Image (spheres, rainbow, N blue to C red):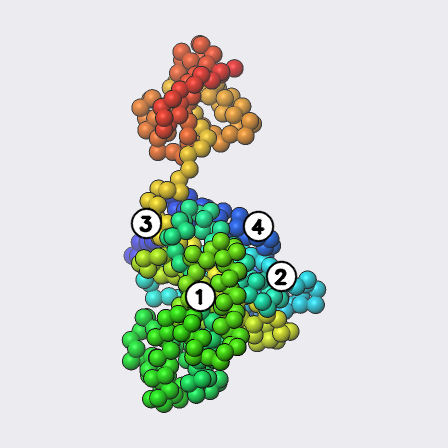
Amino acid sequence: MTEPLSFEPPRGMRDFYPEDMVWRNRVFDAWRQASVSFGFQPYDACVVENLALLQRKSGEEVSEQIYHFEDKSGRKLALRPEMTPTLARMIAAKQGQLAFPVKWFTVAQCFRYERMTRGRKREHYQWNMDIIGEESVSAEAELLAAVALALKNMGMPANGYRIHVNNRALLSEMLAASGIAANHHAAVFLALDKRGKIEDTEIRDLLIKEGLDETAIAKTFDLLSVQTLEQAAARTQADSPAVKALRDLFELATIYGIADRLVFDISVIRGLSYYTGIVFEAFDTERKFRAIFGGGRYDSLLTAIGGQPTPAVGLGFGDVVVVEVLKELLGETAATEKRGVIIGYMFPEQREVATALARRLREAGEAVELMLAKQKPKQFFARASASPAADAIFIGPDDVTNGCAKRKNLTTREEKEIALV
Ligand code: HAM
């Protein structure tokens, strides 16, 4: 006997029932509106990528989580775990024809073979916003202001989240000042990024493997005790460009009206190897959930894949964590919007009148759910209350005789007459 088929999707993959789509649409709409408000242009790409483009040999987690396969001709392909390499490929392919800086956005479905924890799935949608071709922090500031608008559009209160900002270039300066050579920095970043996810002793082992001695390891951990930008500045040279970039960003954030949400945080390093400068990650203020979004500057990725040197900065914002945070802050049903009208009728004889009314209202631009069979009033109103409709019209024989029916607001119970002819 064959095994009965499961009704569950494959582990970590997601089905979206209508009640889930309400939240998904709320988030997607907010992303799109914010992108357009800030002058970003949409782009899209294939979900299946060349494996070689996605794999990096830096030991980062994402490279180990790739879903990959061979097609029937033996091509090594993969489901994209993120959008950034694909974006870099698309930019490199048209580098001579594009007017930089390019500001592009997309909502991309991404796949990662993750260990399943709260907020982590094996498939998610990720809003990506990137600015390619601008080296000043004006780009970072613009991105962070756009993302703040998206969060506002979703109903997230300004005090509900914090954007933690750091600069890998600053960490590099501090590591260099501690005598740790530049060729170790990338590996040190990836090791330190694991803080809180694995034991410090395991991070130590990673640093030993990288060739750091006891003194260097102690100095590395000591960097993480830095609390403020001023303390960090005191550990670098007076004219540190990395400190200046952060100060400029915080200053611009004041003008954009988002400075209250930005915090300097030395522990934000990011788990992707391509970041070169400012990096950021946003969390709910109470830090109950995983990162809502993350991003940063990646000025060397274009050259790493064979393109021309081009500065770049961007962010990825998934749909999983933010919905968890919004549900906690606003309630499970907060995204449900009541609109349009639901129309029902009591006997088969009223079907024609109900259908004609539905047509008239639809032609006038209303959203109308027409019942497809007769119903008892109790049945109809129970369904109407559970539907997304704001109003309900129930047509009985007397309404047809009178030539008008009642349009009832399902929240206030207020009734208005509506002509049936
Ligand atoms: P990332 O930090 O790996 O960055 O992912 C960005 C966001 O995607 C996370 O903050 C989270 O919201 C969401 N996310 C990632 N993995 C999962 C998962 N398994 N389940 C649910 N949500 C997830 C990047 O991917 C960079 N490429 C972002 C970027 C764009 N940097 C520059 N441009």
Q: Residues within 10 Å of mark 1 (few under 14, many from 20)?
A: many
- Residue 132 placement, left or right of 175: right
* Location of mark 1 (residue): 165
C-alpha distance separating marks 2 and 1: 23 Å
* Location of mark 2 (residue): 102
* Location of mark 4 (residue): 36
Which tag is nearer the camera, tag 2 or tag 1? 1
> What amino acid does circle 1 point to?
Val
**Which dot marks residue 328?**
3
Residue 135 location (% of width, % of height): 59, 68
Q: Are marks 2 and 4 in contact (CB under 8 Å)?
A: no
Does dot 3 land on a helix, a strand or a loop? helix
Residue 45 location (% of width, % of height): 57, 60
> What amino acid does circle 3 point to?
Glu
Q: Earlier in the sequence, mark 2 or mark 1?
A: 2
User: Residue at image x 38%, y 22%?
Assistant: 414
Q: Earlier in the sequence, mark 2 or mark 4?
A: 4
Which tag is nearer the camera, tag 1 or tag 4? 1
Quadrant position of residue 360: top right
User: Residue at image x 52%, y 69%?
Assistant: 245
User: Residue at image x 42%, y 85%?
Assistant: 178
- Residue 312 placement, left or right of 3: right
Q: Residues within 10 Å of mark 2 (few under 14, many from 20)?
A: some
Q: Earlier in the sequence, mark 1 or mark 3?
A: 1
Task: Judge by depth and name the residue closer to the eye, 67 or 192.
Answer: 192
Which tag is nearer the camera, tag 1 or tag 3? 1
Does dot 1 land on a helix, a strand or a loop? strand
Q: Are marks 2 and 1 in contact (CB under 8 Å)?
A: no
C-alpha distance separating marks 3 and 2: 36 Å
Quadrant position of residue 415: top left
Q: How many marks?
A: 4
